[in-house]
Image (cartoon, grey):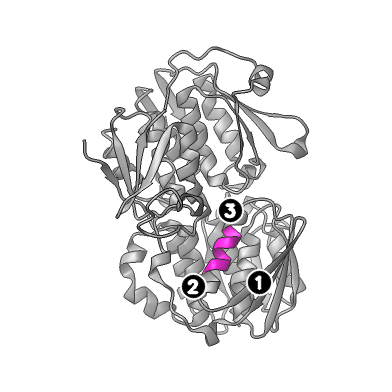
């Protein structure tokens, strides 16, 4: 049986960072004209950032930038605007975005000389940038809520000449995204060094966009691993000899020694899905066009033996896994384990509460009808959770409350082979990251 080829969007994490750097170089308009094929394969978040970066802010009139629910573009753009814009501007979004804190970034930018005020609730968009930063000041920022604040400052730093320093505190979640930002700047010839002390990371940036003037290497704009992850649990519902070829992906660093990495190393932290997929019984290998995934030991327990949470936690064979650096993979993994009837102890997911939705609550709600539970245990600071799938069942119908969250909709779509009637409160939400998702899902013979 030939592999089903899955077309994936360009990594929005990589592309959004690249767009900020290209705009910093002053080459955005020509780059967009020369690379329209890349933009066409992007997503709504990326288009929102392009629209914002393409507006003229030099006319002296106040302007408004609307980011809908796009957290990453909003945060990266806020720092860019605070360093680069000469006219007053307002940055806002929909109810989802305006309920996600931007306070650490705004506080840091104000400490550097900007004048940014809150238009409604303190700590949240809408915000107004009334005065830009005129000269770099070394700054400290917390990454406890999101690594995007640190990435925003890193991408802003080369807008200024000289040596710049950023101290990142509480650097315990999603560090791979900070590394992605550093790799992009390194590729542009901007020297970056870092020293780690405990949970603090001191980063020194030497160089600026204008003097580097190195074009973005299009090879870094690989397909999106965060989107590809959803096809791992989807594969569990296919015939055992089925395979998917996930086009345009590269292997993670740790897999390079054991696989022929024909397309090089991935810059995405979520490329670790090619390893985490083993916990779903799915093997990943490199091909000339991407990554081929196949079922190896994906045992789906038709009637799991019911166990209490304490019994699962105490069992020697229970998988214990930390996903603090890869929170976007959690919905796909959890649904995969639910399908398998496999209970797991998970740590590092507390930050999922601050995404497009409270993803912990969304997962908990939608798992109820499956007889599965996700509960916190231990102290709150431990961030330990037990996913109990020992009572897993498949109802005849499931109404998935997506909470307008793209990752919730895509994750629970993997249940289609097991649940005859699967309905969603919102299917258009996938446009945020993967506009062609439902079309690609049809390739798997699902309706």
Q: Position of residue 35 (x, y in %)?
A: 34, 71
Q: CA distance from mark 2 to mark 3?
A: 19 Å
Label 1 element class: strand
Could one spot residue 439 in this view of the protein?
yes
* Residue in view at x 46 percent, y 24 percent: 340
Whether residue 429 is in magenta: the answer is: no
* Residue in view at x 44 percent, y 33 percent: 412
Badge 2: residue crowd in 10 Å (few <14, some 14–19, many ≥20): many
Label 2 element class: helix
Which dot marks residue 97? 3
Q: Position of residue 172 (x, y in %)?
A: 69, 51
Q: State the residue in front, 63 or 186.
A: 186
Which dot marks residue 53? 2
Q: Position of residue 363 (x, y in %)?
A: 55, 33
Identify residue for label 1: 193
Residue lying furthest front in this view?
A: 257
Badge 3: residue crowd in 10 Å (few <14, some 14–19, many ≥20): many
Is residue 265 shown above or below 286? below
Which circle, 1 or 2, is nearer the viewer?
1
């Amino acid at each position: 049986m030939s592999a089903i080829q899955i077309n994936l969007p360009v990594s929005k994490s990589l592309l959004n960072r690249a767009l900020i750097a290209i705009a910093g170089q002053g080459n955005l308009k020509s780059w967009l004209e020369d690379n329209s094929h890349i933009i066409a394969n992007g997503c709504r978040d990326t288009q929102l950032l392009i629209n914002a970066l393409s507006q003229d802010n030099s006319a002296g009139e106040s302007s408004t930038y609307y980011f809908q629910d796009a957290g990453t573009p909003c945060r990266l753009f806020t720092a860019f605007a605070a360093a680069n814009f000469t006219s007053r501007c307002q940055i806002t979004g929909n109810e989802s975005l305006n309920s996600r804190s931007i306070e650490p970034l705004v506080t840091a930018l104000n400490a550097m000389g900007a004048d940014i005020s809150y238009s409604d609730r303190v700590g949240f968009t809408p915000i107004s940038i009334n005065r830009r930063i005129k000269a770099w000041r070394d700054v400290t920022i917390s990454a406890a809520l999101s690594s995007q604040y640190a990435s925003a400052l890193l991408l802003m730093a080369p807008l200024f000449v000289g040596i710049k320093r950023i101290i990142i505190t509480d650097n315990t979640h999603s560090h791979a995204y900070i590394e992605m930002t550093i790799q992009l700047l390194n590729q542009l010839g901007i020297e970056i060094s870092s020293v780690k002390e405990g949970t603090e990371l001191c980063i020194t940036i030497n160089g600026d966009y204008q003097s580097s003037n190195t074009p973005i290497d299009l090879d870094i704009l690989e397909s999106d691993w965060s989107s590809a992850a959803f096809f791992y649990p989807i594969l569990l519902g296919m015939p055992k000899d089925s395979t998917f070829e996930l086009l345009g992906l590269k292997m993670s660093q740790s897999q390079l020694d054991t696989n022929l990495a024909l397309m090089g190393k991935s810059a995405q932290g979520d490329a670790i899905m090619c390893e985490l997929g083993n916990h779903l019984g799915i093997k990943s290998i490199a091909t000339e066009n991407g990554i081929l995934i196949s079922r190896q030991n994906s045992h789906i327990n038709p009637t799991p033996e019911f166990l209490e949470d304490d019994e699962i936690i105490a069992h020697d064979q229970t998988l214990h896994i930390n996903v603090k650096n890869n929170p976007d993979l959690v919905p796909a993994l959890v649904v995969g384990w639910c399908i398998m009837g496999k209970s797991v102890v998970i740590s590092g997911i507390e930050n999922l509460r601050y995404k497009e939705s409270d993803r912990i609550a969304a997962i908990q709600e939608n798992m109820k009808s499956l007889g599965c539970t996700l509960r916190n245990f231990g102290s709150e600071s431990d961030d330990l959770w037990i996913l109990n799938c020992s009572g897993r069942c498949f109802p005849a119908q499931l109404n998935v409350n997506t909470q307008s969250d793209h990752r919730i909709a895509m994750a629970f779509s993997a249940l289609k082979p097991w649940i005859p009637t699967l309905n969603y409160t919102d299917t258009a939400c996938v446009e945020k990251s993967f506009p062609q998702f439902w079309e690609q899902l049809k390739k798997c013979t699902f309706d």
